[in-house]
Amino acid sequence: MKIFISGYGRMGRMVEKIVLAKQVEYAGWSENVTEVDRKLASECVCIDFTTPDAFRANYKFLAENFKAVVVGTTGWADIRDEVVAYFEKCGTTMIWASNFSIGVNVFFEVAARLSKLLGEASDYSPYIVEMHHCHKLDAPSGTARTLADVVEAESGLRPDIQSVRCGEIPGIHTLGFEGPNDRITMTHEAFSREGFAAGAVAAALKTEQVQGVHEFKEIIFR
């Protein structure tokens, strides 16, 4: 397997570090993936950590030219159906996630169970508070949106989301349920971006085992 990185910002450099540490064949990186040689692209799994605008502009090139694609970029949920349909049309495997941290994906699983139990109790109201560094371009975060989807699917209640952008916070997500007599909260805090990068590389390796379009949390625990 060869891995190519689209986007060489903080996350791209962290992915590069993980790829080199795992001794996976590394084909390089680009800030403008549409300039990549198509023959090289056909041999590579592309890990995309760019910007919402860049991914919107480039997803068709990714689907048409790369062997498989791992999408860590967020901020494109409104065109998700369009993107998924295009990858399926091209027959290109795509694994996407709002957050590739293994811990966050466990967090989603536990949140689903908690939401189901408290949804059945009927007198608890859910909320989400998410905190990130001041450079993050989307708000709420993709992780918070995914968490809200999990809560709504299991409890029938759509949580309010509050976003904080400050300093260099890698990512903190808190899910709370407020009842008449008590409050239940659970929090995931990332210490660095390394966990996100490691999960993205794990997803790239998974593309050798799966076909089609998948959300990371659906396949990581297989």
Image: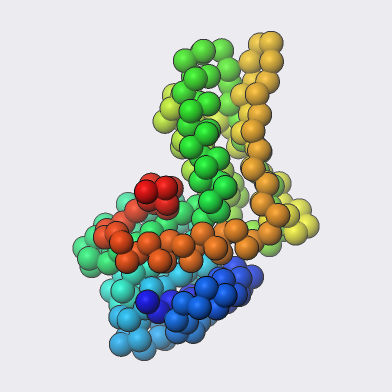
Compared with residue 156, is residue 96 higher up or lower down, i.e. above or below?
A: below
Residue at position x 32%, y 66% in the image: 208
Whether residue 174 sits left or right of residue 45 in the image: it is right
Whether residue 151 sits left or right of residue 40 in the image: it is right
Could you say where residue 135 lies in the image, as x and y percent from the top left? 68, 62
Compared with residue 116, is residue 15 higher up or lower down, i.e. above or below?
A: below
In the rendered image, the residue lying farthest to the right is 167
Residue at position x 48%, y 66% in the image: 201
Total marks drawn? 0
Compared with residue 216, is residue 153 higher up or lower down, i.e. above or below?
A: above
Could you say where residue 48 lies in the image, as x and y percent from the top left? 47, 69
Residue at position x 64%, y 20% in the image: 178
Whether residue 26 sits left or right of residue 103 in the image: it is left
Could you say where residue 21 lies in the image, as x and y percent from the top left? 57, 75
Between 19 and 69, the residue placed more toward the observer is: 19
Between 145 and 26, the residue placed more toward the observer is: 26
Image quarter of the N terminus: bottom left
Colour mode?
rainbow
Residue 205 appears in view: yes
Residue at position x 27%, y 67% in the image: 92
Residue 75 appears in view: no
Between 170 and 203, the residue placed more toward the observer is: 203
Could you say where residue 99 lies in the image, as x and y percent from the top left? 53, 53
